[in-house]
Amino acid sequence: MYTKIMSATDGSATAAKAVAIAADLARAVDAELLLVHVGDPDKGRTVLEEAVSKFARGLKTKTMTVSGDPADMIIESAEAEGADLLVVGNKGMTGAKRFLLGSVPNQVSHHSPCNVLIVKTT
């Protein structure tokens, strides 16, 4: 079924819901969990470490921090890593970059190189 499941997180509560679902799926199908943070590498390191310790214990996990447009970087990361499922929330990111379905999740769903699961996070 799935061998590499990717989820993006910014450290928000809504992103955590998507990561939790991605981790549960990875556990259920014995897949690798790929976690990506788009933004500041220092913040990303902290966000990703917290996500791994909270949701991904016992899973084969890879983390990465990338910079650029969130939708583009999520798509590019999924393609580069050979992900076969992307798990994203229907809402996410705080502050000025806040988005609703129709922006980043919509772009990801239309341009992803693999299947996409959009998690209802609110």
Image (spheres, grey):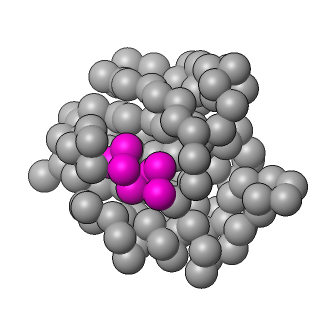
Q: Is residue 56 visible?
A: no
Is 29 situated above or below 108? above
Quadrant housing residue 48:
top right
Q: Residue at x 53, y 30 (%)?
A: 65
Q: Quarter of the image containing the C terminus?
A: bottom right
Give residue 29's quadrant in the image. top left
Q: Residue at x 42, y 39 (%)?
A: 23
Residue at image coords 35%, 70%? 111
**Residue 61, position as x, y percentages in the image:** 37, 24
Image position, residue 96 (x, y; %): 84, 59
Residue 90 sits above or below residue 19 on the image: below
Residue 82 pos. (x, y %): 21, 44
Indicate left or right for 95 with 61 as reference: right
* Secondary structure character of the magenta stretch overall: helix
Task: Judge from the rendering whether residue 24 lies leftward or rightward of residue 46; answer left or right.
Answer: left
Read off the magenta span.
72-78
Number of numbered discs on residues: 0
Is residue 76 within the magenta segment?
yes
Closest to the observer: 26 or 91? 91
Residue displayed at 57% across by 54% down: 70
